[in-house]
Image (cartoon, grey):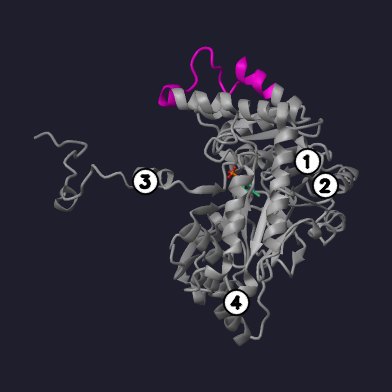
Amino acid sequence: MIIPLVNNNHTTDKKKNIDQSRTPYFEALENYIDSNITTFHVPGHQQGKGAHERFREFVKKYGLEADVSQVLGLDDINQPSSVVREAQELAALAYNADHTYFMINGSSSGNHAMILSILNPGDKILLPRNVHRSTTGALILSGAVPVYMEPEYDYEMQVDHTVTPETVEKTLKENPDAKAVYILSPTYYGAACNLKEIVGIAHRYDKPTLVDAAWGPHFHFHPDLPMSALDAGADMCINSTHKLGGSMCQASMVHVKGDRIDRGRLESAIRLFLSTSPSCLMVASLDMARMNLATRGFELLDNTLEITNYARDEINQVKGLRTFGYELVGRPGVYGFDGTRLTITARELGYTGYEVEQILRNQYNLQIEMSELFNCVALITIGHTKEDVRKIVSACKDVKNWNREHAMLSKIKLFYKRKDRPLELPDWPRQLMTPREAFVAPFEVVSFRESIGRICNEMITPYPPGIPMLRPGDEITVEVVDHIILEMEAGVHIQGPQDPTLKTIRVVK
Ligand SMILES: Cc1ncc(COP(=O)(O)O)c(C=O)c1O
C-alpha cells in the first residue's frame, strides 16, 4: 500500500459548510470607498487627490495592468543600477541627502534597517522612551541595548513630546560608550525637537545621529515647517513619504548624509527587509511624490498650512473644544511645530479622543487619523482643499448635537479619583532585561492583573499612536496595568499581545 505523504483531503464536515465565495476584507474595502467618506488619515494623497495628476491618471487608466514587479527595464530595487538608481539620486538631491533608498515596507522597515546598519548585539543606543513599536522591533532584531531618555511630558495635552538637548547631553555623559543617538522628531502630534543642537552634541561625542522622521517627509519643502532632519545635520533618517508626501501606502525613504554611516552595511540591512517582488507602482509613487514635492511642494504646503490654520482658529472658538497649535512651541520638548497637524480635544465636554473619532465618523462621515484617551488627530495634507477642511470645522461647530451616549471621560476621571491619582499617563516602567533577551527568554502565560512585578515578554501597544506601553524586558507595574485596562475599557485597539483580550500576558519565566 502506498501511504500518501500529503493528505489532500482536508475537507472536514465543518469546513464543507463554509462559503468560500465570501470576501470579507475586500467587501469591507469596497464599502469604505463607496461610502464617500472624507478622509483625514494616511496616506497623505487622500485617495489620489494629493498625488501628482499624471500618476493619478496613470493608475486610473491602467489599474492592475500597472501592477508589475521588476522586469528588464524597470531595474532592481534590491540592487539598483539604472532607473531606480536615478530616481533615488533625484530624491537624494531633492531632500538634501547624499544617498536615498526607497523602502516598500514603510518606515517600520526603515527603522529596522537604520538600527541594524549601526548596532551589533550588546551595543548601546540612546533613544527616547516614546519611540514607535518598529524601533523596539529593531532592538529585538539587532540585540542592541537601549538606554532610554525621558521625553518631556505635557500635562495639558497629556502626551509626550520630544527629548531636550540637555537630556541628550546628560545621557551621553553617563553613557560615553553608546554607539549612536536615536531621536524621534516630529511626534505624531507635530512637535519637533531642537535637532540642530542635539546633533551638535552627539557629534561632539562623535556619535552618529539617527532620526525617526516618519512624520516629516514634507519639512524640507516649506520654510514655515520645522527644519528637516538632514538640514539639521542628522546622519541618517527615515521619512514615511506615504504619510504626508503623497506616495502610496508603505512607500517610504531612508536618507543618509555624511560619512558616519557605513553605506555597504546599511544597504545589506535594507535588503534584509525588501521584498524580492516589489510593487513597481509603489516605487513609481515614490518617484512621482518626490517630483511633486520638489517642483511645487512650497505652493502645495503653503495651502495646507493656510487651511489648517483656518481650521484651528475656527475650532478654537467652539466652547468645550480645543485644538493645539503654535502656542506649544517653547514648552519643554517642543522646539518647532508642524502646522499641518490638527489635534483636537473635547476633554472638557467629557469625551475621550476615541469617542470624538467615532462621532466624526458615524455622524459626519469623516475619518480622522488617530485617537487616544485624551486627544484625536486629523491629518491635513497636500491632498486637502478648504472645502474638505470646512467639513471637519462644521462637524465641530455642531458639537451640541454630538451623540452623548458614551461620553466616558467623566467616568474615567472618577476611576482615577478613586485611586487618588490625577488623570495622566503612567510613568514609564523600568527596563530589567534588554528587549532581545526578554523576547527570546523562556516565558509563561499569567493573568494580566497578576503580572505585576514580572518581566514582560511581549509588546503591548495601543495603536495608534503605536508607542508600546510595555516592551519585552519591561517590569510590569500596577500603574501600567491599571492604565492599559482603562484604555481598553475606553475602546483602544491594542496590538501585540498573544491574547488580544489581555486577560493574560506572556512574562519571562
Ligand atoms: C514615529 C513613527 N515611526 C515609524 C512609524 C512606522 O511607519 P510606517 O507606517 O511607514 O511603517 C510610525 C507609524 O505610524 C510612526 O508613527
Q: How packed is label 3: few (under 14 Cα within 10 Å), some, or many (20 or more)?
A: few
Q: Left or right of 352: which side holds 227?
A: right
Q: What residue sits right under mark 3 in the picture?
A: 25
| Residue 478 position in % (x across, y down) | 60, 77
Indicate yes or no: mark 4 CB to ligand 1 under 8 Å. Answer: no
Residue at the image point whose x is 85% and y is 48% from the top:
198
| Residue 428 is at least partly visible in this image | yes
Question: What is the span of residues highlighted in magenta in the rendered image?
Answer: 62-89
Pointer 3 or 1: first along the chain: 3
Q: Are marks 2 and 4 in contact (CB under 8 Å)?
A: no
Q: How packed is label 2: few (under 14 Cα within 10 Å), some, or many (20 or more)?
A: many
Amino acid residing under circle 3: Tyr
Q: Is 490 in the magenta?
A: no
Amino acid residing under circle 2: Leu
Indicate yes or no: mark 3 CB to ligand 1 under 8 Å. Answer: no
Within the image, what quadrant is residue 411 found in? Answer: bottom right
Q: What residue sits right under mark 2 in the picture?
A: 195
